[in-house]
Image: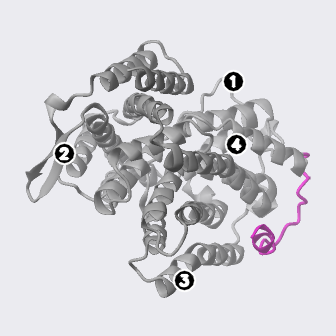
Amino acid sequence: MSSTITDLHEGAAVSHGDHGIAFGEAVRVWARIAALSFGGPAGQIAVMHRILVDEKRWIGEERFLHALNYCMLLPGPEAQQLAAYIGWLLYKTKGGLVAGALFVLPGFLAILALSYIYVLLGHAPLIEGLFFGLKAAVLAVVVQAVVRVGSRALKNNVMRGIAAAAFAAIFFLGAPFPAIILAAALGGYIGGRAGLPAFKGGGGHGSGRGNIVHDRDTALGEGLPYHARPNLFWSLKISGTLLFLWLAPVVLLFVFAGPNDVFTKIAAFFSQMAVVTFGGAYAVLAYVAQEAVGTFGWLRPGEMLDGLGLAETTPGPLIMVTQFVGFLAAFRESTGLNPLVAATLGAILTTWVTFVPCFLWIFAGAPFVEGLRGNRALSASLGAITAAVVGVILNLALWFAIHTLFREVRPIHLLGSSFDMPVLASLNLPALVLAVGAAIAVFRFKVGMIPVLFTCAGLGAAYILLV
């Protein structure tokens, strides 16, 4: 695929090495970033900033943040897209493909291996105990995400109102996630165009800046590389190629397997997710949990938590949990195939239709991204989306809490919709103790996510084995 797409890139008057960075060195650096990409998008972006801006000085602060702002406007995992964008900026199409693919590959392999262990040994006491502890720790991590994103996004009462409305719509009314994001984006865009003070500024992950590295002091310099200039002909050709690579498997499955086949459902659902999931990894997870558990019945709420635990403890984007969802869906609904073979194909298919669109958004839009600088309406739209995402993540945290801390839930019907309420007598006290301990470690003592996850997993295993 790399050579096919690279051949489409024309007008490369400047050689790949003119900025003084050997391609082999770049590959080693991207592999290092991939191996260190734990902790969700904020941590991953901080790692990229530290290595590419502060340490290597390949790219300057202003260009890094401008690329990040563009990626925040896109559906999908902004950290992976940022890697592809900077790789493209350094080495054209080849660089973008390598950087973006390496960012995903370690997590894909790790979660695939852990998924095999989960379905084959998941009922063994040791494995059961590890996931019991992970669930409690993941709950604290998701609550931390609510606080972190909320403290950045909810700067005034209008933004708090958007977050509250998003939470009520998805928790009490079961409103579709895409509709919530679309409404927030439209409201923010209108507010930004009208110049309303509440909509000034946008969202984005902090980069952890210290001393600013100026573009003029970096390998790329201040000028725009020749291949990074807008080229409509090239953009149309590469967009068409990526669109074909993304949608061809979906169309073939519809034609030859039919709309009710599990692989067709996986391809269609995660392709839709790739288009509508604005707002970061946790917003994606909320949407996947809503549909995969509630609509398709591919897995249970506790298993969704297990998948998030796997994604939190392995390198790569958090939305690699979608790979786990596709794995279980195909494992349980395969017909005519060995379940493990079907599960492996489901994981590969899910990853393909999730991440190929990410390259499409970058390669199609990056050459024209300079036109987005200082666009107030788009920044306001992003800010409103981020505020709505706070409400969506709060729903995710509450949903996780109900299904982690209580053994039984009761559906409550309201206005033609329904939501789960816990049966208080079914409180799982050991899970509560672990979750509270994880929250204290995260919020009071600022313990890192990985130590908290591994400690809780160990305590959970000890509890199940001994008690």
Q: CA distance from mark 1 to mark 3?
A: 52 Å
> In terms of secondary structure, what is the magenta stretch mainly?
loop
- Structural distance between the alpha carbons of marks 2 and 3: 38 Å
Label 2: how many residues lie within 10 Å, few (<14), some (14-19) or many (20+)? Answer: some
Q: Is residue 74 visible?
A: no
Mark 3 or mark 4: name the one nearer the start of the chain.
Answer: 4
| Label annotation for residue 252 | 3
- Residue labelled with disc 2: 420
- Mark 2 or mark 1, which is nearer to you? 2
Which secondary structure, mark 2? Answer: strand
Task: Give the residue pinned by disc 4.
Answer: 34
Amino acid beneath label 3: Leu
> Circle 1 — which element?
loop
Distance between the Cα atoms at labels 2 and 4? 38 Å
Q: Are marks 3 and 4 in contact (CB under 8 Å)?
A: no
Q: Is residue 415 left or right of residue 406?
A: left
Q: What type is the residue that disc 4 sits on?
A: Ala
294 versus 337 height, above or below: above
Alpha carbon separation for disc pair 2 and 1: 48 Å
Q: SS of the residue at dot 3?
A: helix
Which of the two labelled residues, at mark 2 and mark 4, occupies the earlier sequence position? 4
| Quarter in which the N terminus is drawn | bottom right
Which residue does the numbered mark 1 point to in the structure image? Answer: 211
Q: Which residues are magenta?
A: 1-20
- Point 60% across, 35% down: residue: 38
Residue 248 % position (x, y): 58, 79
Instruction: Tell me where residue 8 appears, x and y as whole percent.
Output: 77, 75
Rendered residue at 71%/74% (across/down): 234
Eyeballing the image, is 349 above or below 450?
Answer: below
The structure residue drawn at horizontal position 82% and vertical position 48%, both measured from the top left corner, is 27
